[in-house]
Image (cartoon, rainbow, N blue to C red):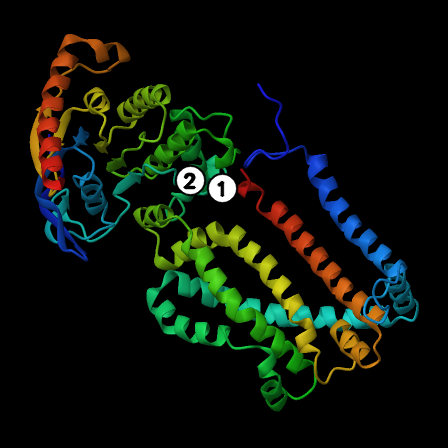
Amino acid sequence: MSVKLVADGISKSFKSNKGNLKVLDSCNLALKRNEFVSIVGTSGCGKSTLLNIIAGLLAPSQGEILIDGQAIEGPGRDRGVVFQSYTLFPWLTVEKNILFALKSSKISNKEKSDLVKHYIKSVGLNGFEHSYPKELSGGMKQRVAIARALVYKPSVLLMDEPFGALDAQTRGMMQELLLNVWQEHKTTVLFITHDVDEAIFMSDRVLIMTARPGSIKAEIKIDLKRPRNYEMLTSPSFMQLKKEIIAAIRTETLKSLDINS
Amino acid sequence: MKKKSLFEIRTAIPRHIYLLSGISFIAFILLAWQIVSQLKLVNPLFLPSPIDVINEGLRQLREGILLTDSKASIYRILVGWLFATLLAVPIGILMGNFKFIEGLLEPFIDLVRYMPVVALIPLTILWAGIGDFQKFLILFIGTFFQEVLMIMDNVKNVPLDLIKLGRTLGLSRYAILKDIILPASLPAIWDSFRITIGWTWTYLVVAELVAANNGLGRRIMDAQRYLATDTIFFGILFIGFLGLVTDLLFKFAGNKFFHWNKS
């Protein structure tokens, strides 16, 4: 399989009043086409910073991001982003929120509305086309955000703890829904989370980040068969993977606590 | 469980009690006022009775003074406020989005903002004469410098993630301003309109202080000369009443326009 997304030696420092704060230190990763990869790490390790750099919203201090071998120069429609906070436009209905992403697409209005309909169906929001965001639950809002991030067919989907604000039950449903949507539309996904179960359940590979300054410490291949279902969450092979990942994260968490104390 | 009292911290109370209490308070003030003047506790020259004030209002209405005054004043308020708003909206939006423009204009605006508007009357007469334009200018100065800072803050309150999202969708800066920041901040800007037009109302008397031959504020200033306290009382209360009506109109329209904003 060909390589879709490469982060090559990404470092990032922020100026603060205590001097330079190094958040990322030579971060390297590569995603194959249509691969689902998660990044897990302790809070404050720079996961979100890395995602923002890949999205083109932040410039790295060093290194570059390549998509299909081309260095990126900023945000672009080849990458869709779903944020943790609900980023729907409150003045637009569900339908119009998704349509918003197609504003600059050079297709006919008929094609646009067909696409919107299709994606509303994919994320299971039939009947809510004309609802405003204030009428939706948190899980439904994130489903609209996912539909909006996919409707213009970016080749990479970047997700920054998209289910972080949801309750455990909704979160489980959303994970299955996202996997279904991903299987249907096949795209490369980079998924950031601090939930180890979520990372294993969703991913082909889980990358573990070190404590700040963050870099990729280890990679764990998840060879659970697809399609996945919630019963796998309690299978012995799942438990074994979870054990490995938790042990790795724990070492990093302890390190970061030592630095701070 | 214990029965809830009306004084639970941050707890809703029945709507009719809420409304009734507000109305009763005003009724209480009116009643106290009537009693004080009926018992002649205060010289009527200083405190006319509510009845006198109402009669004064009816007289003005009969003689058509009230209508002429209101028309003149409302016209001045509208022009002064619109003038201030037409400038405050684009400048406030630019200041809220571009640090350079904020840095350029904020020190100047803060300086002017603290200058007493009354003290500017002589200058405005010198510059703008004694016609309506001078009144617009006073109302403009009283409104604009506050309004522009409020709109700047309204715009700054648009969540950064919405703007980031616009960038990931490949929108230009202009499109982000027009299609994301403007609609997202509009309910808050509308609320600033409501508050600032209230301030324009409070500057009305200042605007009509010098060289006006009609207007609600003018009427109050004239009455001072003849010790007509009933006219003064009526004028003040009537301006308050028109202010309240303006406020309600803005609230009502805002709820209609921005129905998607209420939670």
What label sits on residue B202 in the rendered view?
Answer: none
Q: Which residue is mark 2?
A: A88
Q: Residues within 10 Å of mark 1 (few under 14, many from 20)?
A: some
Q: Amino acid at mark 1?
A: Leu
Residue at 25 percent across and 9 percent down: it is A231
State if disc 2 and disc 1 touch (CB < 8 Å). yes
Q: Is residue A224 visible?
A: yes
Q: Which residue is mark 1?
A: A92
Residue at 53 percent across and 43 percent down: it is B261
Quarter of the image where one finds residue B65: bottom right
Give x and y (percent) for residue A142.
38, 32
Give x and y (percent) for residue A62.
9, 52
Q: Is residue A3 visible?
A: no
Quarter in which the N terminus of chain A is drawn: top left
| Residue in the foreground of this view, choosing between A260 and A160 | A260
B86 left or right of A171 in image: right
A243 left or right of A141 in image: left
Give x and y (percent) for residue B75.
72, 71
Residue at 50 percent across and 29 percent down: it is A128
